[in-house]
Image (cartoon, rainbow, N blue to C red):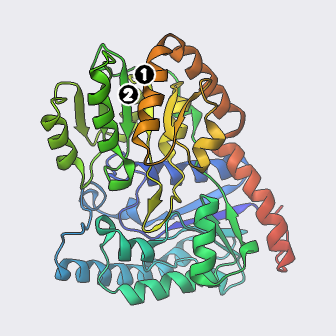
Amino acid sequence: MKRLGYLSGSPRISTRLQAEEHGPACHVAGTINGFLSAGWDVFPYIVGDRMPTRWVAGSRIRSRAGAMQRLAADLLRIGLSQWHGRNAYRELGENLGWVYERYGVFQSLGLVFQRLGIPWILETNTPFSLENEREISRRSVCFKSAAQAHEKRAYQRCDALVVQTAALKDIVVDFARIEAGKVFVVPNAVELLRFSDLAPIRKFSAPTIGFVGALRRWQALDQLIRALRDLSREEIAYHLVVIGEGEKKREWQDLSQTLGMADRVLFTGSVPAGRIPDWIAGFDIGFCGQAGTVAGCPMYFSPLKLYEYMAAAKPVLASAHGDALRLVIPETTGYLFGPDSSSELASALRRAWHERGSWPAMGIRARQVIEAGHTWDIRISDVIARLQDFLQTKGFPAVV
């Protein structure tokens, strides 16, 4: 019975075009479409798609929010979880092979289905409690201990847990004291249809590096801006387009001004999700410079931007983490540099500049790498097979 209940309890994660959270929206849509391509019927229950538009477009509870605002947000999350858990069951029923839930703070919509004998597969893309404790930009929870306990219980109770990277798997296994065998690593991927028939949006005629994502500390854009200023003294004249919002935006804009780079660095802010492929098509190189650590741990994100740059046939300039090490063939599909290494970043930028005539061919090869093994259809087909085998060892019947 290939019938999947797809659950997402976060009130801010939405697949609507107005959604501020571009990455999560693409991840949700990619996962659902991957199951559909594998022959499953999918019945989504996405709370963010049921919320007013203002909830999903720019309503983030930020670190500077007062205690009362965070308290109100927590109470809303808890109340919504209880109500939506019951309502999801009323709408979807129990005639499902699996339920697959994207975890959100205080959200466990799949628990009611599990109690009725349906396998509950939980997906988590970040250690929420750890980030809330250690990363100022991620502090949006008032009931910290309760949130941590809820997250831990959800990881322990679910029948299988899906994460994006091996580093995140290590973190959640240690955090929740769960068996490593129930945790499945499924890196990000891309839907190629979104990156076909593009209409490039180009703001500079000169060679342009582009970035798409949340403007947070670990994205290392300050390091890139400084490197571009230094290289300009060698008549290496890159321009930079930065797409996204975040707490570092004003600081990095000011840095560009201070370094005399304001006319060569464009901060667009958020752009409609449907136009992001066209913006990427206007880049010459995509930048993904993640720092070495986040929340005091080795970098554990699977950066969607890497896959999107390459799907748009762009070479990438990336720090050497797990996904980039698998995707980027130096001087063939892009350039690698050591995380947090200004000297290696500068060297990679120099190499790229002197090889700029090769960028179009590198982009074509980058797209071929994505087509060959990094689409959502491929990802989900693979994890379905692995989950089938694992769940049968736990006594669940095969889904046919």
Q: Amino acid at mark 1?
A: Asp
Q: Which residue is found at the position 16% from the left and 77% from the top?
A: 66
Residue 81 location in percent, x, y?
43, 80
Would you call the spot at circle 2 few (<14 residues within 10 Å), some (14-19), or many (20 or more)?
many
Residue 141 location in percent, x, y?
32, 78
Q: Nearer the viewer, residue 105 or 363?
A: 363
Q: Quadrant of the N terminus?
A: bottom right
Could you say whether the residue bearing mark 2 is in a helix, strand or loop?
A: strand
Give the image quarter of residue 40.
bottom right
Query: Can you see residue 280?
Result: yes
Q: Do labels 1 and 2 touch, CB within 8 Å?
A: yes
Query: Can you see residue 189?
Result: no
Task: Say which residue label 1 marks.
Answer: 284
Q: Nearer the viewer, residue 105 or 109?
A: 105
In the displayed structure, would residue 345 be above or below residue 183? Answer: above
Q: Nearer the viewer, residue 60 or 116?
A: 60
Task: Say which residue label 2 marks.
Answer: 209
Q: Which residue is found at the position 63% from the left and 67% from the top?
A: 169
Q: Which residue is found at the position 43% from the left and 77% from the top?
A: 129
Q: Nearer the viewer, residue 254 or 69?
A: 254
Could you say whether the residue bearing mark 1 is in a helix, strand or loop?
A: loop
Would you call the spot at circle 1 few (<14 residues within 10 Å), some (14-19), or many (20 or more)?
many
Q: Amino acid at mark 2?
A: Ile
Q: Which residue is found at the position 24% from the left and 30% from the top?
A: 265
Q: Quadrant of the C terminus?
A: bottom right
